[in-house]
Amino acid sequence: MENAKIAVIQFQISPPKTDIEQSIVVNDYTQMDRILKEERNYILGMIKKIKATGCNVLLIQKSILRDAVTDLSLHYLAKAKILVIKDVERDEIEFITKTLNCLPIANIEHFRAEKLGYANLVEEISLGDGKIVKITGIKDMGRTTTVLVRGSNQLVIDEAERSLHDALCVVRCLVNKRFLIAGGGAPEIELSRQLRAWSKVLHGMEGYCVRHFAEALEVIPYTLDENAGLNSIAIVTELKNRHAQGEINAGINVRKGQITNILEENVVQPLLVSTSAITLATECVRMILKIDDIVTVR
C-alpha cells in the first residue's frame, strides 16, 4: 500500500456476540438470512466510517477472548482496498503508535483522521521462511528504532535479545549518570580496602559492621575469578596487594588471566551499575535484619 494512512485499532471489526449465559435460537432460514444481513450491515457500517477518514491500512490489536476480525470482515475490507495487519500484540501497541506518530483507537465512534499515521509505503516482504510487514517513509516518525533479530533456533534468538537488552541497559545507565569507572573488580576491592581501614578507627558494633561490609564486597572479584576459571585466592590476594600499593585502577584481566591496569585495557563500566548494586544489596540486608521472627504456615 503506497501513500498509507495507518490506523492502530483496539476494537473488533466483527458483530457483537452473546455472552456465555445467553444464546440465540434460529428456527428457520428466514431468521438466519436476517441475522446474516444484519451482520453484513454492521460490518459495512464500520468499514464506511473507517473509509471516510481516508484510512487504507489497519493494524488490529490481538483479542484475548476471540478473533478481532472475521473472514467476512476481511472480505469487505479487501473490497474497500484497506490493508489489514491483524493479531498485533497488546504490549507492542505503545511502541507502534509512538513510531507511527498516531493514536490508538479504542472505539469506532472515535475514529478520526487526526488519529492516523502516515507513511510512503507499507509492504509485506519475505524473510527466510516467514514474512514481515515493513513500513517505510513514516511522516514525523517517533524517536524509536526497530532491531530485527534472526537466528538458527529460538535459543540463539533469546541470547541475542538478552545481549541487546544488556547493551541498552549500559547506555541507559550512562544517560542517567555520565560517569565511567574501571571494571574487573577494581572499584569493589578499592572500596573494600578503604572500608577496612575505616573500620579500624571505629569501635564496637560499628567497626564490626563496616569490616563485614568490606568483606562482602570481595564477593565480586572472587566470583569474576571463578567464572573465568582462574585461581581466585591467588588472584584476589594479588589484587589486594596492588591496591594497597596505590594502584587503584588495577583489576582482573580475564583474557590474560592476571592483574593489569584495567583502564589501559579499556575495560570500564558505568558508575550507576556499582552504586545501584551496593544500594540495593544494602537495602535488602536492612530489610532482612528488621525481621524479628518467622511464622511457619501451611
Image: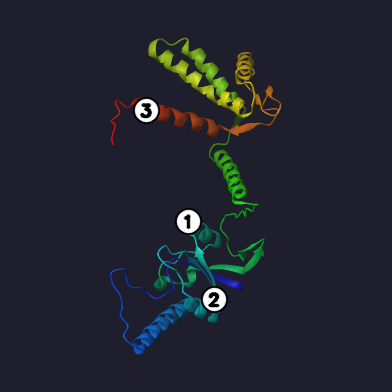
Q: Residues within 10 Å of mark 3 (few under 14, many from 20)?
A: few
User: How would you rate the neighbour count of disc 1 (Cα within 10 Å): few for under 14, some for 14-19, many for 20 or more?
Assistant: few
Question: Can you give x and y, in whole percent of width and height, for residue 51 in the image?
Answer: 50, 78
Give the number of the disc on residue 268: none
> How many numbered badges does the structure rendering display?
3
Q: Are dots 2 and 1 in contact, CB under 8 Å?
A: no
Identified at 56% across, 32% down, the residue is 271
Q: Which residue is located at x 62 percent, y 51 percent? A: 153
Instruction: Please say if the residues under marks 3 and 2 sit with CB atoms less than 8 Å apart.
Output: no
Q: Which residue is mark 3?
A: 288
- Crowd rating for badge 2 (residues with CA inside 10 Å; few <14, some 14–19, many 20+): many
Asked if residue 1 is positioned above or below residue 211 in the image, the reply reads below
Image location (x, y in percent) of residue 35 = 37, 83
Dot 3 or dot 2, earlier in sequence? 2
Identify residue type, mark 1: Asp
**Tag 3 secondary structure:** helix
- The residue positioned 48% from the left and 28% from the top of the image is 278
Instruction: Give the Cα distance between marks 2 and 1.
Output: 24 Å
Q: Is 221 placed above or below 111 here? A: above
Task: Give the position of the N terminus as an image quadrant.
Answer: bottom right
- Of pointers 1 and 3, the one earlier in the residue sequence: 1
Q: Of the two numbered discs 2 and 1 on the same chain, state the one appearing first in sequence.
A: 2
Q: Look at discs 3 and 2 and give the one toward the viewer.
A: 3
Q: Which residue is mark 1?
A: 91
* Distance between mark 3 and mark 2 Cα atoms: 59 Å
Give residue 251's position: percent from left, percent from top. 64, 24
Residue 32, percent from left and from top: 37, 85
User: Residue at label 2?
Assistant: 82
